[in-house]
Image (cartoon, coloured by chain):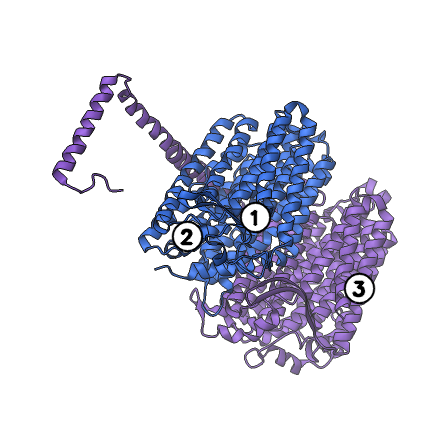
Chain colours: A blue, B purple
Amino acid sequence: MDAVYGRQAIIGDLIMENTLLSLLIWLPIMGGALVILLGNERAMTARWMSLAISILVFVMSLSLWAGFDSSTHLMQFVEKISWIAQFNIHYHLGVDGISMPLIILTTFSTTLVIAAGWEVIQKRPAHYMAAFLMMEGLIIGVFSSLDAILFYAFWEASLIPMLLIVGIWGGDNRVYAAIKFFLYTFLGSVFMLVSLIYMYNKGGSFSILDMHNLSLTAAEQAWIFWAFFMAFAVKVPMFPVHTWLPDAHVQAPTGGSVILAAIMLKMGGYGFFRFSLPITPDASLQFSDVVIALSLIAIVYIGFVALVQRDMKKLIAYSSISHMGFVTLGVFALFLAYKPDSTEGALLGLEGAMVQMISHGFISAAMFLVVGVLYDRLHSREISTYGGVINSMPKFTGFAVLFAMANAGLPGTSGFVGEFMVILGAVQANIWYAVLAATTLIVGAAYTLWMVKRVFWGKITNSAVATLDDINGREFSILTILALAVIIVGLYPQPLIEIMHSSVDHLLNQALTSKL
Amino acid sequence: MENFYLTIALSPLIGAIIAGFFGRILGRTATHTITILGVLISTVLALMVFNYHVLEQGEVFNQNLYTWMQIGGLNISVGFLVDNLTSVMLVVVSFVSLMVHIYTIGYMHNDKDYTKFFSYISLFTFSMFMLVMSNNFMQLFFGWEAVGLVSYLLIGFWHHKESAVEANLKAFLVNRVGDFGFLLGIGLVLAFSGSLDYVEVFASLNNTIGQSLWGMDLITVICLLLFVGAMGKSAQVPLHVWLPGSMEGPTPISALIHAATMVTAGIFMVSRMSPMFEMSEVALTVVMVVGAITALFMGLLGIVQNDIKKVVAYSTLSQLGYMTVALGVSAYSVAIFHLMTHAFFKALLFLGAGSVIVAMHHEQDIRKMGGLRKKMPITYWTGLIGTLALIGFPGFSGFYSKDMIIEAVHFSSLPYADWVYYAVVAGVFITAFYSFRLFFLVFHGQSRVDSHTAQHLHESPLSITLPLIMLAIPSAIIGYFTIEPMLFTGWLDNAITVDGLKHTSMHELSKLFHGATAMISHAVQTLPFWMMVGGIASAWVFSLYKTQWADWVQSTFKRTNYVLNSLYGFDRFNEIVFVNGIKKLGNILWKVSDSMVIDSMIVNGSARFIGFVGSMVRPIQTGYVYHYAFFMIFSLLIILTWTLFMGDKPLLVI
């Protein structure tokens, strides 16, 4: 049990129990710097080195899982050093069952993205790889920070590599998309900074865990709730602040889209778990109706919008928004789903939201990679360019159909688990929530499989499609790994749920305990 | 015991995996040997399970294999419940699947994706086993959707055909409409019982008493939602539209999936949930009426079809309607009985049709056939057995099951049961008519086969005729031997609950029943028998004796003919309202709401607004020092004045 530190034990003390988290943050950042130093001329070395670093980081992040004690909600792998003493700001890291899976998702996705960009990226390859490595470190920083200022620093810093990735390696309209992305997310998070400073003024500490216990009036909670909401809703993204995402995805290179969808969106969801619910429980309860309404709009409305897209990446981007609606629905349905004699309804929503985040990480990554494989070959994202791809790329089609089915929430894939849990939880909150959310069963299948039909089935109409080469060994390995992840979580989600259970249970108590 | 059941499920899965991933390396013979071996193992074990549970009255097996997820007190597991109902389903599924596997060797031997096809049908068999052996709703849903997936893949197996890939999309989406209801029903089950395990759910059914939702009893809502799922899978009106389209797939899967097994999953599910449906008169009435509509009106469509597979498909829809009617009148065991006999004779008919199609070089229009009797004797005789079983000719298996359904409706006290009775009796005439129309047009009369095909016309190889013979045997006799134990002496008692006080059909039936032989001798005194004879006679007149009469009827009753040929307009309605309507809605939401209002007006609008403010403020930044000095002094003046006159009140409150 020496991996575990109670909250009381760490206040005021400097702790360096384990440097694993620091390594996970700084190794890829330093590694990225090194890759830049190698320069674009030595592209092959840069690629191999980036891959080696990302694999090393991934393996190291697995030891988080191995050493994790899932019987407690307390922070683990804690590091705490004074950083800016006069403002009581600490370099304070730690993970629980909510952040740990997201960190592993980050290291996992980064490895795949680096492999996926291998010979595809010819423009400044070393810089490309370095940007992803640095972003990996920064995002791990977001998920493991326990000090609000440190969190904010990582949160904003992680925008920069993504901005560059879209802005340098993106499509024709990349500058518009990059700036839109940056302004949207930056504006959202400025309000978060204000409320963090406000809470520091009131409680004298930037520790997120202290903020959880800070007593706040209803009015203060409302202000803070909406300030956070601005930051997180843009990231998720929730309706109506979602319009940056389709643009960013369409313009971003494949790797950028993968990281954006698989991880960056999860930062918003994570924010609701780590900040909104425990810091402003009463405001969360008060405004849960609004958030649920927005989530349901995202699920239904965005589903219809996805249906009519002609650009594959846009379609998947809209589908991402729709799927992320399940995350916010699951989180905020807890207040209505909770019954004193049985917490299962609320837990299904919360844990379903977590599972949905992880699963969406796999599936959206896979879907964007699938589009990337086609784009690399024909340089078109238009659905109408394709048709009958199965004839020239049978192996690839097998993967694409599997991931499409996962995207449509087929049982046996991870896509089913989260949606199933959230819908079951939503039934207990309000049957109409469930009715609206469950329409995704039809609409989600419609837009995904209709795309599959137009791209993969049928006769070849475009002669260029006939000459396509099936996936090579590298692409095959990447897609196989993702396929295994999707199926394993689908068939046996229990280990994932077990990891997060104590933390989510604790969060549920926090959310249900009034601060007034 | 656990491993025993696990082997049943896993051996086809292993076959599917080997065939799917290594089929090309292993070659055709090895692939089909492995998959057939896998299904053969399942079949043998299924027979042993049947022997243990049904014949020896062994104990019900109910055990979880592993915890899928544990949330608080809620445990969702993967596990097996094997009782007599499951045993019957296992035998039916594994036997038909085995026959179809063997048949595929002959039917698909020219196909380039031969090994893939074997992989899919073995995967289907696994999914179907998981569905029928499940002991909880989650796994039921898993199997439910997994069979849907395989169905999707197999309907679109010939993916170069545009019609095939249209049909598989349609099939999947229409099934998803059903699953939408099904999933909500499962959600409500969890909400009232706190569990998804069948046994625990059935034990806590009393929780629902007195609760209501949407102006109905809670249990009624749950049953109706679950039934929506059954309507999708078992193709009941109005969710039947996908089944005729599914005929685009290769014929072996039409037999296995779209006739014998998958489409009966809805029937199986409602029977499994009999404790719930028994609590709601409203739900049972809806089930019965929907079934009757399907039985009658889909049968009528069978009359005007000219595609050999489409005729059999509409007959499948109609027969599924009969099973659903039986469920509605609480004769669950009769529904399962008809499910079983239908699985044999309908698989036989489809495989027979496939045999004809192969011989005809993939010509499916029955107007271009005729006189095949001499050329294809085995297909002819087995086809005759299948047809007689389908129309319920006394002694054949379908006779017992269909007669029992009609009698059960007769005894039902549900509202509208009298109307439903007329519908199912009329259905007998229609069934006999279209079945023998098909039979006469294909096998009898003048040959209308084109000369090139006629030269090559011959009986199919053994791999095709053997399954026909093997299926013809149960089609002929199984009803005679199983009607008494299955319906009246308790084969299914440990799986099916009937509220005997309220729903007396089964009780009345048992009073009437005096043995299988007696039923044959009494048949001539019953109305359905004469309806059937009338149907055969009419079919003979119209398709052999006076074929011009058929044309006369068609031209005289134009309007009826139009309605039937347009399939009651369901497809057009769906096309206009759902497909185009939703595309329009999507476009409006995208172009107007998303792109124009949110993006152009609000997002880029605020960017322009800031630009506008900037342009307004820009002239102030003149660069002249005296302008800045003026502003500074002016502002200072305001601040000073404020402090002087307003004391310690702050100028700005932040």
Q: Which element type, helix, strand or loop, lies under badge 1? A: helix
Q: Which element type, helix, strand or loop, lies under badge 3? A: helix
Disc 1 chain ID = A
Amino acid under label 1? Leu
**Which residue appears at 36% of the width and 28% of the height?**
B608
Which one is nearer the viewer's eye here, A439 or B241?
A439
Asked if residue B303 can be seen in this view, the reply is no
Q: Are marks 2 and 3 on the same chain?
A: no
Q: Which element type, helix, strand or loop, lies under badge 2? A: helix
Count of all numbered marks drawn on residues in the image: 3
Which one is nearer the viewer's eye here, B133 or B445?
B133
**Nearer the viewer's eye, disc 2 or disc 1?**
2
Quadrant of the drawing holding the N terminus of chain B: bottom right
- What label sits on residue A211 in the rendered view? 2
Q: Where is residue B426 in the image (x, y as percent from the top left)?
A: 61, 65
**Nearer the viewer's eye, disc 1 or disc 3?**
1
Amino acid under label 2? Met
Tell me, yes or no, whether the two marked residues, 2 and 1, touch with CB atoms within 8 Å: no
* Mark 2 → mark 3, Cα distance in angstroms: 63 Å
Residue of label 1: A102
- What label sits on residue B43 in the rendered view? 3
> Does A431 appear above or below B220?
above
